[in-house]
Amino acid sequence: MSFAPRDARFLLALTTAAAPVVGHALGQYWHAFFVFWVVVPALDLLVGRSEAPSRGAEMSRLQRNPFFRFVLHAWVPLQLALVGWGAWLVGSGGMTGFDALLFTLSVGLATGGIGITIAHELGHKRAALDRLLSRVLLVTVSYGHFTVEHNRGHHVRVATPEDPASARYGEAFWVFLPRTLIGSLAHAWTLDRREVLGSWAATLAVAAALGAAFGPLAVAFFFGQSAMAVTLLEAVNYIEHYGLERRKLADGRYERPAPRHSWDAYHWLSNAFLVNLQRHADHHVNPMRPYAALQPQEDSPKLPMGYPGMVPLAFVPPLWFAVMNRRVPRPAHG
């Protein structure tokens, strides 16, 4: 395994599992929100961006180094432990109602912000083990149909009116959210209902097992952290393609997806935490390219902040529109 010191930055993704644990140890259940939505965006601005492309031998190393796959696999037991521990903690009834709610949502920040991000990366791999681990992670956030719809739906229809996961210009996040939840599930059902039913059955089995072991509050915790995780995922979907549109050609088909159809952010720190998810334009152009090898794209529109800063902004539509509408390229809405 070839390892360069700079590769260690992606280990930061694994540390996010500690945020709800530290919050519980301190008795401050807002801790994870403060870290993810205040501290990381502030540090993003201080640390700066990394926009240098990789070439030649370095590009080959980034594509083949097994260390980067190890990081993805290492998250899986952390998420399983976090969900199991959280179910036990809430199921025991040792927290007051509001503390239990904040703790549940803080776990969802980790399982959604990092867990679904890593499930997304694993779901694009060819290896059977990687795809299995992707399903395991998605089952534990009650969103097992995601890979079916994302790989075979979103990547085909991105930045078109047919894609429920591409936000339209002027569409508030709270309008986008029910549209993408319903539309993505409906399309996944048409693509592979057997996979959808299997994921539902597995999620219900996990919830039933937690309920049998730790009681009904554990089931509430499980679905509560799932709701937070999915909301976070869809907030990222909202950000990634907001207001961007592919042109319809004379033959009725859409132009090929290009870098200009995805928003990018090159902030070094948040890309380390999010295993380069914010280099999203290259991901759509080269969906099988490993996350460590994703490259900056000159033609992609650029976000003013990384996702940790953009997500809370998306939750407040007037602020989002004030910041983003003037940045949307003119052809996309004019």
Image (cartoon, grey):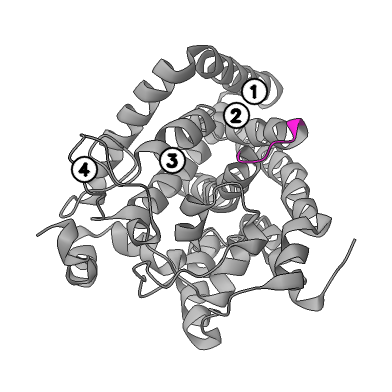
Q: Is residue 22 visible?
A: no
* Residue topped by disc 3: 155
Q: Is residue 322 above or below residue 121?
A: below
Image quarter of the C terminus: bottom left
Q: Residue furthest right?
A: 1
The three-letter code of the residue at mark 2 reads Val
Which residue corresponds to the image point at 72% horizontal and 37% vertical from the top-left? 130
Q: Residues within 10 Å of mark 4 (few under 14, many from 20)?
A: few
- Image mark for residue 206: 1
Lower position in the chain sequence, tag 4 or tag 2: 2
Tell me if residue 125 is in the magenta stretch.
Answer: yes
* Residue topped by disc 4: 249
- The picture quadrant where one finds residue 187 is top left
Which residue corresponds to the image point at 80% horizontal and 59% vertical from the top-left? 65
* Residue topped by disc 2: 139
The three-letter code of the residue at mark 1 reads Val
Quote the CA–CA distance across marks 4 and 2.
39 Å
Quote the CA–CA distance across marks 1 and 2.
8 Å
Quote the CA–CA distance across marks 1 and 4.
46 Å
The three-letter code of the residue at mark 4 reads Leu
Q: Is residue 85 above or below residue 6?
A: above
Please report contact status of discs 1 and 4: CB closer than 8 Å, yes or no: no
Dominant SS in magenta = loop
Lower position in the chain sequence, tag 1 or tag 2: 2
